[in-house]
Image: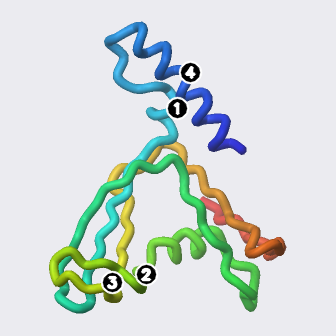
C-alpha cells in the first residue's frame, strides 16, 4: 500500500515537474529510490551479463518453516545470496541453461522500504520476524 501511495505521489510530482522545468527529481525519488546491479553468470560458458534496475523497495520472501523466528537482518542478508536461475537463455552460448544471479545495491535509498511477502498460494505465512536493533 505504501509503495502504491508513493508511486501516485511521484506521478503527480512528475506532472508538475514537466510544467516547471529545472527540477531534476521528485522528493519521493530523492528519499526512496535506489539502484541494484544484477549479475547473471552462465554456468555453461561462464559469460557474465550485467543489468542495472531501479528500486523503490525490496519485496522479500519469508523463510518457510524456520526453526526460530528469523531476524530481519538475516532475511535481508539472505535476499542478497547468490541464486540459481534455471532455464536461463544465454545470449553468448545460445543455450537454455542454469545461471547464477548475484544482486547488489549500487545506489542505496535514504529510506529503504522492505515488504515481507507473507502469502504463498492462498495461505498466509504467520511467521514472526525479530526486528534488528541498530
Judge by depth and name the residue closer to the eye, 66 or 19.
Answer: 19
Judge by depth and name the residue closer to the eye, 134 or 8.
Answer: 8
Q: Does residue 28 appear to the left or right of 38 in the view shown? A: right
Q: Which mark is residue 28?
A: 1
Marks 3/4 in contact by CB < 8 Å: the verdict is: no
Q: Secondary structure at mark 1?
A: helix
Q: Measured from the top left, where is residue 126 in percent x and y?
A: 83, 73
Q: Measured from the top left, where is residue 28 in percent x and y?
A: 52, 32
Q: Does residue 64 appear to the left or right of 53 in the view shown? A: right
Above or below for 59 versus 41: above
Marks 2/3 in contact by CB < 8 Å: the verdict is: no
**Nearest-to-viewer mark from 1 and 2:** 2
Q: Which mark is residue 12?
A: 4
Residues at marks 1 and 2, CA–CA distance in whole angstroms: 30 Å
Q: Measured from the top left, where is residue 83 in percent x and y?
A: 43, 81
Q: Secondary structure at mark 4?
A: helix
Q: Does residue 83 appear to the left or right of 40 in the view shown? A: right
Instruction: Mark 4 or mark 2: name the one nearer the start of the chain.
Output: 4
- Mark 2, residues whose alpha carbon is within 10 Å: few (<14), some, or many (≥20)? some
| Residue drawn at point x = 64 percent, y = 68 percent | 72
Instruction: Mark 3 or mark 4: name the one nearer the start of the chain.
Output: 4
Q: Secondary structure at mark 3?
A: strand
Residues at marks 3 and 4, CA–CA distance in whole angstroms: 39 Å
- Mark 3, residues whose alpha carbon is within 10 Å: few (<14), some, or many (≥20)? many
Marks 4/2 in contact by CB < 8 Å: the verdict is: no
Q: Measured from the top left, where is residue 20 in percent x and y?
A: 40, 8
Amino acid at each position: 500500500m505504501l509503495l502504491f501511495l508513493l508511486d501516485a505521489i511521484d506521478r503527480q510530482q512528475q506532472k508538475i515537474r514537466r510544467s516547471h522545468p529545472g527540477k531534476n527529481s521528485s522528493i519521493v525519488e530523492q528519499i526512496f529510490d535506489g539502484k541494484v546491479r544484477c549479475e547473471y553468470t552462465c554456468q555453461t560458458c561462464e559469460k557474465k551479463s550485467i543489468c542495472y534496475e531501479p528500486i523503490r523497495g525490496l519485496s522479500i520472501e519469508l523463510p518457510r518453516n524456520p526453526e526460530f523466528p528469523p531476524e530481519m537482518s538475516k532475511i535481508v542478508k539472505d535476499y542478497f545470496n547468490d541464486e540459481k536461475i534455471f532455464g536461463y537463455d544465454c545470449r553468448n552460448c545460445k543455450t537454455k541453461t542454469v545461471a547464477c544471479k548475484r544482486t547488489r545495491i549500487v545506489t542505496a535509498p535514504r529510506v529503504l522500504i522492505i515488504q515481507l511477502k507473507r502469502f504463498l498460494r492462498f495461505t498466509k505465512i504467520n511467521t514472526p520476524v525479530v526486528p534488528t536493533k541498530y
